[in-house]
C-alpha cells in the first residue's frame, strides 16, 4: 500500500508541475513591429529612427500577443543597447489597459543618448511573467546636434578659411559642447578618411577638409551638421609672409635677438611658437629670444591670422631664413 501511495503522490506532483508549466506558457508575445504615426500625414511606418531634428521624437510600434493576461498585468516596451543586448534595458513605454486587446499600437520616444546601428526592442509582461521575442536591430539616432560644425586649427570658433603651414597641423571641432562624446566623418577633398572618427584630425597632407557628426548611414544627411571647409596647404610659409633674417646666428648668455616678420597689419593677430608649442603671451608682431634663459634653443615660428586666413612663417634650421641657436 505504501508503494501505491507513493506512486499516487508522484503522479499528482507530475500533473501539478505540468499545470504550472502550461500556466507559465499561457502567454506569447511577438516582437514589436514599426507602425504608422497617426499624427503625421500619409504612411509613416519607420525603418530607422532619426529623432531630435526640430524636437521631433514620436514613433509607434505594433504589439501583438496571444494567451491570457491577468488583471494586474503590465506590458513593458523595452529598448536594448546599441549592440542589441538587453542586459540593462531601457523602458520606452508601460501599458496597463491592453490585457484584453491582443493587437494594439503604442507610442514611444527614444532617449537623448541613443546613437547606434543595432538597437532592438522587445515586450515583456508582468503577470504572468514573460519576455517576448526581440525585434531585429534598427539604426536609431537622437540627433541633439543639428547645426553646422565649425572646424579650425586654433579652436576659437572662427572658420579659418585657409591654413598654410610648414608641417602637420591639427584641425578640431570647436563649437559644440563635449565634442569628444560624438563620432565624426572626415573628408579630404571629397575623399572619406577611413578610420578618422574623433573630434580632432591630424592633417599631414594638403587638401580641402570638412567634417560631419556621424549619425549613421540613414541619419547623417538629416543632421545638417556639415562643417565649414578648411583649405590646408602643408609645406608653405603663407602668402609671401616670412620672418626677417635674424642679425645673430649665435647667442651668448647676455645676448637677445628680436624676431620680426616682413609684413604686419593692425587687423591681424599673432601667435609665436617654439618647437611647435605656443609661447604664452607671445602675441605681438615681434618676439625677443633671450640667450640668458636656459633652454632658449629651438625652432621659432609665428602664426598670423589675417581675416579668415592663417599663415605660418618659420625660423629654423630647415628653412632658407635659418638661424642656429
Image (tube, rainbow, N blue to C red):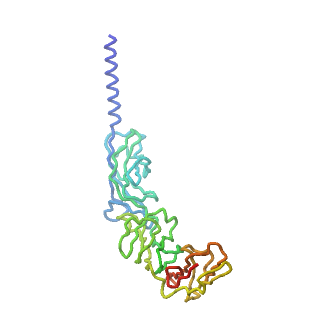
Q: Position of residue 64 (x, y in %)?
A: 32, 48
**Viewer-closest of 38 and 209:** 209
**Viewer-closest of 89 and 127:** 89
Q: Position of residue 140 (x, y in %)?
A: 39, 59
Residue shown at 52% from the left, 81% from the top: 314
**Viewer-closest of 77 and 175:** 175
Q: Position of residue 172 (x, y in %)?
A: 48, 71
**Viewer-closest of 85 and 44:** 85
Query: In the picture shown, does residue 40 fall above or below 156?
Result: above
Quadrant hosting residue 235: bottom left
Left or right side of 239 for 194: left
Which quarter shows the C terminus? bottom right
Count of all numbered marks drawn on residues in the image: 0
Query: In the picture shown, does residue 28 fall above or below 62?
Result: above
Residue shown at 56% from the left, 80% from the top: 324
Q: Position of residue 24 (x, y in %)?
A: 35, 35
Which quarter shows the N terminus? top left
Q: Residue furthest right?
A: 254
Left or right side of 322 for 29: left
Quadrant hosting residue 22: top left
Residue shown at 31% from the left, 62% from the top: 43
Amino acid at each position: 500500500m505504501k508503494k501505491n501511495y507513493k506512486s499516487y503522490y508522484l503522479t499528482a506532483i507530475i500533473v501539478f508541475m505540468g499545470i504550472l508549466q502550461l500556466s507559465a506558457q499561457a502567454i506569447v508575445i511577438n516582437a514589436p513591429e514599426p507602425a504608422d504615426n497617426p499624427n503625421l500625414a500619409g504612411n509613416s511606418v519607420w525603418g530607422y529612427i532619426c529623432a531630435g531634428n526640430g524636437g521631433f521624437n514620436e514613433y509607434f510600434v505594433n504589439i501583438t500577443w496571444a494567451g491570457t493576461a491577468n488583471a494586474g498585468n503590465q506590458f513593458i516596451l523595452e529598448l536594448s543597447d546599441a549592440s542589441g543586448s538587453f542586459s540593462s534595458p531601457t523602458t520606452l513605454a508601460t501599458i496597463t489597459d491592453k490585457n484584453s486587446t491582443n493587437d494594439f499600437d503604442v507610442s514611444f520616444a527614444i532617449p537623448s543618448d541613443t546613437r547606434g546601428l543595432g538597437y532592438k526592442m522587445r515586450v515583456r509582461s508582468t503577470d504572468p511573467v514573460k519576455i517576448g521575442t526581440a525585434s531585429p536591430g534598427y539604426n536609431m539616432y537622437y540627433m541633439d546636434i543639428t547645426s553646422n560644425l565649425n572646424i579650425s586649427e586654433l579652436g576659437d570658433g572662427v572658420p579659418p578659411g585657409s591654413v598654410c603651414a610648414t608641417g602637420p597641423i591639427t584641425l578640431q571641432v570647436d563649437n559644440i559642447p563635449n565634442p569628444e562624446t560624438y563620432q565624426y566623418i572626415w573628408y579630404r577633398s571629397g575623399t572619406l578618411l577611413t578610420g578618422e572618427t574623433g573630434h580632432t584630425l591630424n592633417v599631414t597632407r594638403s587638401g580641402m577638409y570638412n567634417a560631419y557628426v556621424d549619425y549613421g548611414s540613414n541619419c547623417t544627411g538629416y543632421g545638417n551638421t556639415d562643417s565649414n571647409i578648411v583649405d590646408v596647404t602643408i609645406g608653405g610659409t603663407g602668402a609671401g609672409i616670412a620672418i626677417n633674417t635674424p642679425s645673430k646666428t649665435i647667442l651668448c648668455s647676455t645676448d637677445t635677438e628680436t624676431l620680426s616678420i616682413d609684413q604686419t597689419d593692425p587687423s591681424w593677430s599673432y601667435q609665436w611658437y617654439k618647437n611647435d608649442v605656443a609661447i604664452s603671451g607671445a602675441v605681438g608682431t615681434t618676439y625677443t629670444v633671450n640667450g640668458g634663459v636656459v633652454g632658449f634653443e629651438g625652432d621659432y615660428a609665428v602664426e598670423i591670422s589675417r581675416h579668415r586666413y592663417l599663415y605660418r612663417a618659420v625660423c629654423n634650421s630647415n628653412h632658407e631664413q635659418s638661424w642656429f641657436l
